[in-house]
Amino acid sequence: MSEERFLVVRNDEEQYSIWPDGRELPAGWHDAGFAGTRDECLAHVDEVWTDMRPKSAREVSS
């Protein structure tokens, strides 16, 4: 049995999530360019999403 594949997705506020590969992305979410197993995708999100604040909140505090 093959392991389910996922995509790392990102919204306009630069928040990350994972989404099952092959399913239509929900409105407002875009492919972030990484795919793999659930664990691989979650590890990638942990690596790249270093500031959990939405983009709009980061811009206000800059």
Image (tube, rainbow, N blue to C red):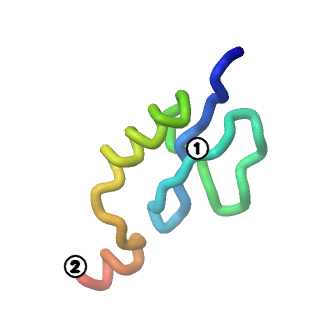
The amino acid on which the numbered mark 1 sits, given as a three-letter code, is Asp
- Specify the quadrant that holds the C terminus: bottom left
Mark 2: secondary structure: loop
Q: Position of residue 15 (x, y in %)?
A: 47, 61
The amino acid on which the numbered mark 2 sits, given as a three-letter code, is Ser
Please name the residue that numbered disc 1 is placed on.
31
Neighbourhood count class around disc 2 (C-alpha, 10 Å): few under 14, some 14–19, many 20 upward: few
Q: Position of residue 47 (x, y in %)?
A: 31, 44
Mark 1: secondary structure: strand
Q: Residue furthest bottom?
A: 60
Whole-angstrom CA distance, mark 1 to mark 2, is 27 Å
Q: What residue lies at 60% left-to-right and 50% top-to-bottom? A: 30
User: Closest to the observer: 40 or 22?
Assistant: 40
Quarter of the image where one finds residue 7? top right
Q: Mark 2 or mark 1, which is nearer the start of the sequence?
A: 1
Quarter of the image where one finds residue 55? bottom left
Q: What residue lies at 45% left-to-right and 42% top-to-bottom? A: 42
Position above or below: 57 against 3: below
Position above or below: 36 against 15: above
- Specify the quadrant that holds the N terminus: top right
Q: What residue lies at 51% left-to-right and 43% top-to-bottom? A: 32
Mark identifier at residue 62? 2
Q: What residue lies at 41% left-to-right and 72% top-to-bottom? A: 54
